[in-house]
Amino acid sequence: MALIGYARVSTTDQNPELQEAALREAGAERIFTDQGVSGSTSSRPELDECLDHLRKGDVLAVWKLDRLGRNTRHVLEVVEQLHDHGIGFRSLTEGLTTEGAMGRAMLTIMAAFAQLERDTMIERTRAGLDAAAANGRRGGRPRKVNDADAAKAVRLRDQGLAVPDIARVLGVSRATAYRYLSAAAPSSA
């Protein structure tokens, strides 16, 4: 029997060291780590390799349940697949294990709450974006050139300036100058 660890961070900027240290402290002989992979993605290279590596009698350990996945169905499918092959599962933070009926029941409940938390977060984010849009605000990078500068670009073009010169005057790239000239063209006609 071997304790095998799996760690995952969603972005390449995040550091999996905390998870890996906890898994090593729990006795993990080997740790598979996906970096820059969302938990909502069912196919993850290191998780796939980890699942292939596991043998009957082994235990798969994760630092926290949401590291295995945020989708309840996927988490439960993976745990059921492990159980069918005689492989145990342990979530260190929540203290969950698939040993015994109570452990499996608690795992199902925790996976459902993890998905509820994720769905609620997505709902709140969408509501916030909708509220911002209703107030005339959009997400994303702020425009480099405002409407006044776009109008100025059109006037400069009408005076005979070439686009590279317009870009220099406005302090923007040539591509940005072209974008604002083309966006302003219908309203200037």
Image (cartoon, helix red, strand yellow):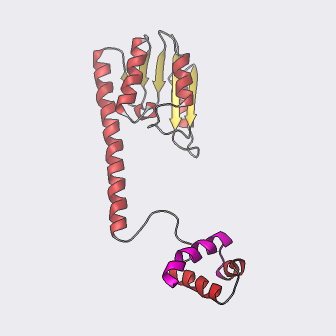
Magenta region: 170-189
**Predominant secondary structure in magenta?**
helix
Which residue, as the protein is rendered here, is positioned at the far front?
Answer: 189
Observer able to see residue 25: no
Using the rendered view, name the quadrant where residue 152 is placed.
bottom right
Image coords of residue 154 (percent x, y): 59, 84
Which of the pair 55/176 is nearer the observer? 176
Q: How many marks?
A: 0
Image coords of residue 8 (percent x, y): 52, 35
Image coords of residue 160 (percent x, y): 69, 87
Observer able to see residue 148: yes
Which residue is at a point 33% across and 44% down the rendered structure image? 119
Q: Tell whether 47 sits left or right of 164.
A: left
90 is within the stretch colored magenta: no
Which residue is at a point 33% across and 53% down the rendered structure image? 124
Which residue is at a point 57% across and 25% down the rendered structure image? 31
- Residue 41, relative to residue 131: is it above or below? above
Which residue is at a point 51% across and 80% down the rendered structure image? 147
Q: Tell whether 137 sits left or right of 18.
A: left
- Residue 66, relative to residue 119: is it above or below? above
183 is within the stretch colored magenta: yes
Using the rendered view, name the quadrant where residue 94 is placed.
top left
- Residue 39, relative to residue 121: is it above or below? above
Image coords of residue 173 (percent x, y): 67, 71
